[in-house]
């Protein structure tokens, strides 16, 4: 199964993700000239969460067979690497990328499921090096996730990753002709992305978890804040050098439940920092549970994955 497959059009996309303490599901409907409508935002406590029985029950409850089903991988279950785009025909691209990844992965490349995502080139500079993202996950993990859905009787079509989900939300907020940086945190760490023209140009993980941001000890919490500011400065400076044709308008901070992080970053990085209010981006009238911060943090990337354009699906 590919990460970025195409799928037959059904009622829409139903996204499922497995957290340590349960199963999350989300469904979003895009609306012309209006904010996307969140039609489902659900968390069901389950232990262990990777349960075919629980998935089957939730699938029946939410009519999973009527939708294109997507599962969202968690941090640590895959790697995203930026590589130079091989100058080969399209049908040889993945083979060429696989060869380039053989010394870059933390497992043997023969054990990897690989997909690629293009990074658009600067149209004003045709001689610029062309790069792409390579996404790799262990074959046995991909197979086990497919087996789980099959056992549950839920037809799995797409496997997605948080980088793409975050890109989809950022694309709703991009100013015309400028880039947008977005930063989110979960139990696996931080994720910094930069969008431009609704395309992903930067994806970088930060070794700071949500638990570290919520640390009761002020000194430890501020050490995490300092680390974030340093990594942001390095990453954004590198981005400016690599993609000088993109001017980033602001940094958008995804829900964290830690308002002091916004204040700290506003005072310590060179660009405007905005805290994302989901109600400003999505219509939450059918999902009042998302008015609570805990659920916003938990379901943030699922909402992004549910924004995937249906015309891009199998």
Image (cartoon, rainbow, N blue to C red):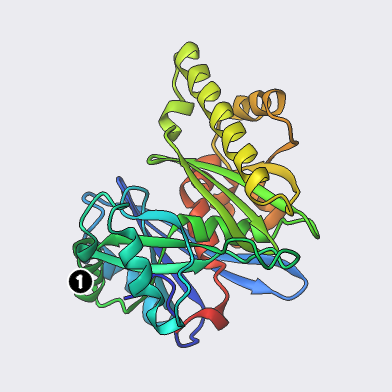
Asked whether, in this view, residue 113 is left or right of residue 225, the answer is: left
The one of 283 and 17 positioned closer to us in this rendering: 17
> At which x and y percent is residue 38?
58, 64
Seen from the viewer's position, the closer of residues 37 and 73 is 73
Q: Up-down: is 90 above or below 187?
A: below
Write the residue at 53% across / 18% down. Answer: 222
Q: Secondary structure at mark 1?
A: helix
Q: Residue furthest right?
A: 176
Q: Tell me where residue 101 appears, x and y as whole percent.
A: 33, 59
Residue 251 sits above or below residue 198 on the image: above
Residue at 45%, 69% (x, y): give it. Answer: 86
Q: Residues within 10 Å of mark 1 (few under 14, many from 20)?
A: some
Question: Depth check: 134 or 292 in front?
Answer: 134
Point out residue 220 in the picture as x, y percentages from the top left corner: 45, 16
Q: Residue at x 69, y 56 (%)?
A: 281
Q: Quadrant of residue 121?
A: bottom right
Residue at label 1?
A: 147
| Residue drawn at x 44%, y 68% as measured from the top left | 116
Q: Where the C terminus falls, by quadrant?
A: bottom left
């Amino acid at each position: 199964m590919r990460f970025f497959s195409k799928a037959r059009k059904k009622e829409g996309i139903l996204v499922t993700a497995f957290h340590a303490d349960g199963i999350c599901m989300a469904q979003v409907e895009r609306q012309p000239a209006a904010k996307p409508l969140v039609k489902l935002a659900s968390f069901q406590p389950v232990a262990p969460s990777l349960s075919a029985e629980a998935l089957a029950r939730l699938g029946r409850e939410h009519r999973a067979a009527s939708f294109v089903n997507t599962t969202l991988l968690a941090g640590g279950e895959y790697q995203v690497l930026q590589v130079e785009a091989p100058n080969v025909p399209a049908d040889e691209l993945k083979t060429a990328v696989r060869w380039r990844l053989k010394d870059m992965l933390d497992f043997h490349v023969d054990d990897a499921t690989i997909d690629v995502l293009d990074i658009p080139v600067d149209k004003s500079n045709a001689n610029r090096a062309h790069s792409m993202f390579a996404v790799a996950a262990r074959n046995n993990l991909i197979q086990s996730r497919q087996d789980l859905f099959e056992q549950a009787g839920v037809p799995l079509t797409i496997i997605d990753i948080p980088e793409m989900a975050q890109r989809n939300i950022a694309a709703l907020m991009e100013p015309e002709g400028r880039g947008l940086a977005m930063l989110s945190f979960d139990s696996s760490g931080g994720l910094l992305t930069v969008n431009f023209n609704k395309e992903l140009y930067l994806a970088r993980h930060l070794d700071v978890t949500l638990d570290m941001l919520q640390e009761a000890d002020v000194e430890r919490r501020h050490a995490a804040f300092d680390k974030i500011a340093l990594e942001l400065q390095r990453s954004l400076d590198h981005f400016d050098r690599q993609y000088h044709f993109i001017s980033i308008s602001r940094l958008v901070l995804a829900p964290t439940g830690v308002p002091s992080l916004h204040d700290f970053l506003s005072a310590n990085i060179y660009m405007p920092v905005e805290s994302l209010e989901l109600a400003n981006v999505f219509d939450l009238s059918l999902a009042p549970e998302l008015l609570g911060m805990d659920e916003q943090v938990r379901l943030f990337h699922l909402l992004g994955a549910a924004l995937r354009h249906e015309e891009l699906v199998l």
